[in-house]
Amino acid sequence: MHFDLADLRLFLHLAECQNLTRGAKAASLSPAAASGRLKALEGQLNARLFYRDSRGLALTHAGEMLQRHARAVLRQIEHVRNDFLALSSDSAGHFRIFANTTPITESLPAALVTFMKGRPNVTVDIQERNSRDVVRGVVESSADVGLLSVPCHFETADLQTRLYSTDRLVLVVPSGHELGDREVLSFEECIDLAHVGLRDSTLQGYIVERAGALNRKLGMRVLMSSYETMCTMIAAGVGVGVLPESCARRYIRAGMRLQVLGLSDTWSQRERYVIYRDLDALPFCARAFIDTLIAVQPQPELETSSV
């Protein structure tokens, strides 16, 4: 059984006006055309929808039943139309982000505060994933946008990328540490020290990989679940750790007794990328978020830092 939405709208106009001529006019049809469409609808349903007399039209039991269904159908169509109209604006909608730990803690908060201001009808689903899963999620459309903060092989025709920021990995030691008088050192010089790491993170895997490239094993002492607990353990003297500089500086400003030492290795300078499949296919709100993410980053870092 096939229903024409125009016939349902005509039927509701006739039921409301209770008159063929006025109902046809409301539907922008001639009385003859409206009568023909009504008869075709009754024939398709095999049911009489109106009683007709000199006073006008009155719904039959079948007509009352169709009226309920027609109102529900057209109301749902209106909801669909409104939902898709929202996608043409950046002030409403929903999108999903897959991201590494570092972007979630360092880049996203400021970007989201700016982006969500004035957009109460936008919702964002943020999921923390390792780099491989971020790339796979965007390629397979499980996520609309991906944020990466470590080198990753995402050069594929299925993805578009934009550099949105740079950061620097540093060695963080407790205040008064024996290396505290050094401003810069190589990663190889600190591999044998007791290290505090970040459990199940892309950063931890990356640091272990860098040690392996030197045919060395990282001297891990404890693995923590957040940058804050990492810094707490480092400040207490449990070990040292490799963290993003912006993160370490934040906890120093918060009063933790830590020192930051630069790493001379070229890989300590990292580019952060936002990735997506097709910018034009993204919801308008996701496109606006990408623009905001790039705009709120400190411009001097973008201009002077390199891989």
Image (cartoon, helix red, strand yellow):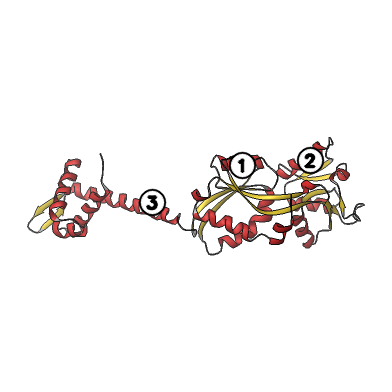
117 sits to left or right of 210: left
**Residue 105 x/y as whole percent:** 68, 53
Q: Is residue 298 above or below residue 171?
A: below
Q: Residue at position x 72%, y 61% from top?
A: 300
State the separation of the CA atoms marked 3 and 2.
51 Å
**Residue 263 x/y as whole percent:** 83, 50
Residue reaching furthest bottom? Answer: 118
Q: Earlier in the sequence, mark 2 or mark 1?
A: 1
Q: Residue 210 has which mark?
A: 2
Q: Earlier in the sequence, mark 3 or mark 2?
A: 3
State the separation of the CA atoms marked 2 and 1.
21 Å
Snapshot quadrant of residue 12 = bottom left
Label 2 amino acid? Arg
Label 1 sits on residue? 135
Q: Residue 219 has which mark?
A: none
User: Pointer 2: residues within 10 angstroms few (<14), some, or many (20+)?
Assistant: some
Q: Residue 80 has which mark?
A: 3
Residues marked 2 and 1 touching at CB (< 8 Å) = no
**Label 2: which secondary element:** helix
